[in-house]
Every structure is written in structure tokens, then in C-alpha cells.
Image (cartoon, grey):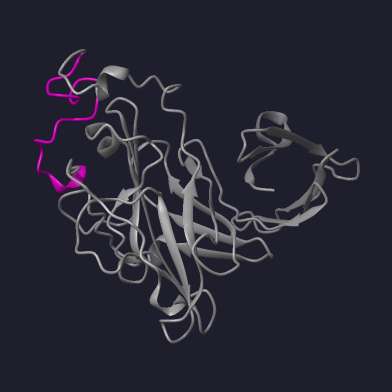
Amino acid sequence: FHGKLWVNIGNDGYTNALIETDEGELIGFKLADNSNSISTNFVFVNERGTFEVNLDDFDNVVISNISIDETNGDSFVMKERDGNKRMITLGTYDNSIAGFTTGTWDITVPGAGGVENIESVIVTSSGGGMNIELEADLEGTTPGCYTGGPYAPFFWTDNTDNRYELYATGQTINLTATTTVIYDFGFGKAVCDNNSLPYTQGLFHPEATADILFGGLAPGCYNINDRGYYVWLEADGVTVISAGRISFTLPDFGALGYLPFCTNGIMDGTETGIDCGGTCAPCLTDDNANTRNVDSQYDQVELAIPSSLK
């Protein structure tokens, strides 16, 4: 079970909760009969399961005893207010390259649009357990498909400029005292649009995984057919425990109203250049690094076999 949970305690006179699953299903919860407004511990229930919310420390809310569809769960809690919204993107990772580990790979950003630094990366395994990397632990990234940098890992959403860009490359998580996970992920709608590529593509420089998975790649913009890769390494930094692809649930861009003339290879509609400008992706003329200018050129690459697996 994988999803986003919103809990409302007393706002507008209501106390309730809502889960949105990674498949888009909405599940409502209500207070159990033994919960009341005087308590700081609230029990939420419905026919699918139950969980508890503890407000003993209002700045550090705890959600525990989660059981949904007869499966116990973990949670990462973030407070949200009218002036401090957050956006969550759900993802998963597999073991399609090596090993046995699968699970979920989610990211959060503050705000509800524009260019935002990634605030946290939340990784869980199918066997249980949650690992959280906060913004302060993320390294500056050189995505490869953007000029300038390095940048803090970022998420850029802007319907007006036809943007949906998600990048964190060259990253490391100390998963245990002796093992490390390295990872890269990226998706650039502007790069896809500029090159008439489908939105299933990942477009970035696999900085962390370049040597192990791709046989070595110089910095650049690469189309590698997936939105991200990870490698879990033993303490020697060579032996691969598990490796695979990272995938994120992206929006339905057609439903967002992005216009088809932005990718047809001619200048039409509201464009000021071929497939750019107007209501399409901005044309590549601004060198201000703060706008994270996209590079329209990319190279196609294929996976190599990790040497430690031969």
C-alpha cells in the first residue's frame, strides 16, 4: 500500500483524514468512537484499516499503528498550512538490474509550483523500514540537460511555461553503517518536447551511476529510457547488493491542457520559435542560471553490466 495521507484536526470544525493511493484512489477516514476533541491522541478508522495521530508535541506530530488492507505501514509526517503548502511525488524502485530489493521512492517539495528545491527523499523497502534524506543532506547536482549549476536537486512545475522538470543526480544515501546507495534521477518535459520524445524517457547525466551501470559517461545530457537508477553497494564500494530503476508517477500532461502544437516540429500556434515560446516551453535564449536553462541536445545511451556482477 502506497499513498499520500492528509489529516485535518479541527480545522473549520472538522476532524477527518484522506488517503490518495499511487493509483489515484481516494479513501476517507473518520474518528473512531473512542476518540474525542479533548484528547491529543486520535484514532482514525474505515473498513480498510486504521491509524493513530498523536499531538502531544504539536510541532512533531506522530502517526503510528498504521494498518491498511491488513498490512502494517510506516509514515513520514510533514505539517502543511495555507501559507506553507507541500507537493509530494510518489515513486517506486525495482531490482531489474541486480539483487532482490524493491520498494517506494518518494520526494517532497515545499510550495505548490515554480522552481523548488527538493525537501526530502523518502525510500522504503518492501520488507519494511524507511530511510529519509533531507534537503541538507542532498548534494549539488549537475543534471546534464541544463546549463549552469551545480544546483540543489530541484522540482520545477509551471503550467504557464509548460514546465515539469525533476532532477537529482550524483546523490548518496548511507543506508546502513556499512552500505551505501548511490542514485540519479531526472525527467525534463522541456527536453522531451524539444526533441519530440515520449514522456516515458529519463533525460539527465547519471553522475553517480555512470561508471557502474553505463561503463563510464562524460558529463552531458543523456536519454537513458528510464527516469532514474540506483545502486546499493557494500562497504567496499564495488560489490553490488541490489540495483534497478527508479520511476515516478507523473501527471497526465494532456489533462493539464498542454497543447499539441508544442511538439510538431514547426512554428505555429502561440510559439515564437519552433515548438517553443508562447504557451509552449520557453525558447532557449536566457542564460540566467536561476532559470535552469535546458539543453535541447542529448545522446542515447544503453546500460552496461556492472563489473561486480560478471
Residue 247 to residue 126: above or below = above
Q: Which residues are magenta?
A: 270-292
Q: Residue at x 29, y 52 (%)?
A: 204
Majority secondary structure of the magenta segment? loop
Q: Foreground: 13 or 237?
A: 237
Query: Residue 291: within the magenta?
Result: yes
Q: Position of residue 228 (x, y in %)?
A: 41, 54
Residue 299 to residue 126: above or below = above
Can you name the residue that lies furthest to the top here?
269
Residue 125 to residue 193: above or below = below
Q: Residue at x 29, y 36 (%)?
A: 192
Q: Position of residue 108 (x, y in %)?
A: 47, 49
Query: Residue 71: within the magenta?
Result: no
Q: Position of residue 16 (x, y in %)?
A: 73, 36
Q: How many marks?
A: 0
Quarter residue 119 falls in: bottom left
